[in-house]
Image (tube, rainbow, N blue to C red):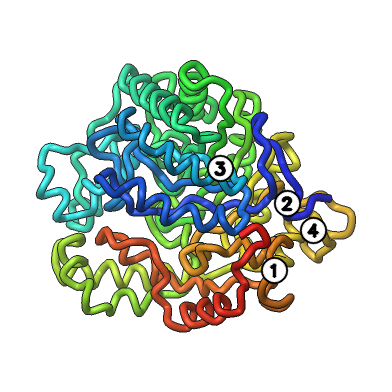
Amino acid sequence: MATLEDPIEIGGVTIPNRLYRAPLLECAGNGPDAVDALIDDLEPAAESGVGLICQGATIVRGDGGCAAPGMTRVHDPDFVKRLSRLTERIHDHGSRIFVQLEHGGLRSMETWHDEYRRDHPGLEQLAVSRPPWQLRLLDRLGFLSYDPHVLSTDEVYDLAADFGRAAASAVDAGYDGIHLAGANMGIVQQFLSPFYNRRDDEFGGSPEARLEFLAVVHDEIRERAGDVPLMTKVPAETPAPIVRRKLSLEDGVEIARRLEKIGYDAVVPVQTSVVWDMSIVRGAYPERAWTNEGLQAEYDAAFGGAMRKRLVSLANRIQSIQYDFEPAWNEEFCQRVRERVSIPVLAEGGIRERAEMDRLLGGSSSESLGEGEPPACDMVGMARPFYAEPRLGARLLESGIGGNENERTRVLCESCNNCTVPQVTGAPGICRTPDVLRARGELEREGAYERPES
């Protein structure tokens, strides 16, 4: 059975250990300081020994498609060349870096961000099909604003080619692999999901056809970027009110199985909603973030006024009850996928303790896995905990030299989500919880984030 410190191979690239920094919103944009901002965000994890760094969702087109302010675009090869400084810094620490490619489709800012929509009146959302009636109802009620452009068959091929071109530029800049944002309500999930995809061409009409977009993206990346390691998130959709057509857990397992046949090198099974809610950031209602006086004007600009801001906050509170924190909430999905595929399965979502990581990797028996049963995954990842502890790897991996054994057992992140809500304003993803910041300061003074080579 594997340990967290064991290397693993993904598509011919060796990752030095099985801990990865899952994709986060870095809010770096594309300005003159973008590369430095990405280095500041991502290098600390590599310095701390994390084997794989996944740069968060980057947009493959120059217009539209951003689900939140500050997303970096990778449509311009000249800009992507500048990112070689980032990849070199990650490689200096012995880590590997994958870039996550994305397009938001109906989830894009032109749907929900009031100020952005007013500043870009000509932007339409790219849509797989006409939006479902539930979303059209939200449009009529004024909660969202849709002006969708349903992709023609030729335009679907053009979008897949944009993924391929972005991947080729990234490989030229030194990225070790490509990670597709196949869940979290982006356009890839919209192709996969029967809730969104009502097409009647080769990209819709059956489970196999709904997978065809990922098959074409695979071929475009292989043709343009070569045999670079290629992985994707695989969604299974959680229950939602008045939603009947969705991806079940078994549907997600079958998608993963078919992706291996297509030629994908690894998969990340995640349970997510058909709409943008707290299913991907399960935890507490972020009271501190919503009551932050310094962000109220920015919230009003994003949501279109105080009333809509209060409605969004109320929905956030309700969702925090529906999606309360659950340790390793994707474990069952990952385990079922791993039983059906031979490529690496990566697990993320609510993983917070070293002992839990060992269990998921098969390093110890447990009530959920049982003695002698196969592990649930081949790598374990975290996202929000790296906002709280940018050099978290040093505390979790055996190469760390500071702290004590008790401090190595659990991350500081409280899953309070005070880091995520401010990002709708373009604010950086940082921990804002005083108790966590104080605890991190104490660990820093004790040398808990130091490694022998540093």
Q: Closer to the observer: label 4 or label 3? A: 3
The numbered disc on residue 369 is 4
Residue 87 x %, y %:
48, 40
For the question of whether residue 151 can be seen, the reply is yes
Tell whether label 3 touches label 1 (CB within 8 Å). Answer: no
Mark 1 surroundings: few (<14), some (14-19) or many (≥20) residues within 10 A = some
Report the Cα–Cα distance between label 4 and label 3.
Answer: 35 Å
The residue under label 3 is 91
Q: Is residue 437 above or below residue 247?
A: below
Residue 122 x %, y %:
11, 37
The amino acid on which the numbered mark 2 sits, given as a three-letter code, is: Ala
Report the Cα–Cα distance between label 4 and label 1.
Answer: 31 Å
Q: Earlier in the sequence, mark 3 or mark 2?
A: 3
The numbered disc on residue 386 is none
The amino acid on which the numbered mark 4 sits, given as a three-letter code, is: Leu
Mark 4 surroundings: few (<14), some (14-19) or many (≥20) residues within 10 A = some
Residue 247 x %, y %:
52, 43
The residue under label 1 is 401
Q: Is residue 381 above or below residue 193?
A: below
Query: Which corner quadrant holds the C terminus?
Result: bottom right
Q: Secondary structure at mark 1?
A: loop
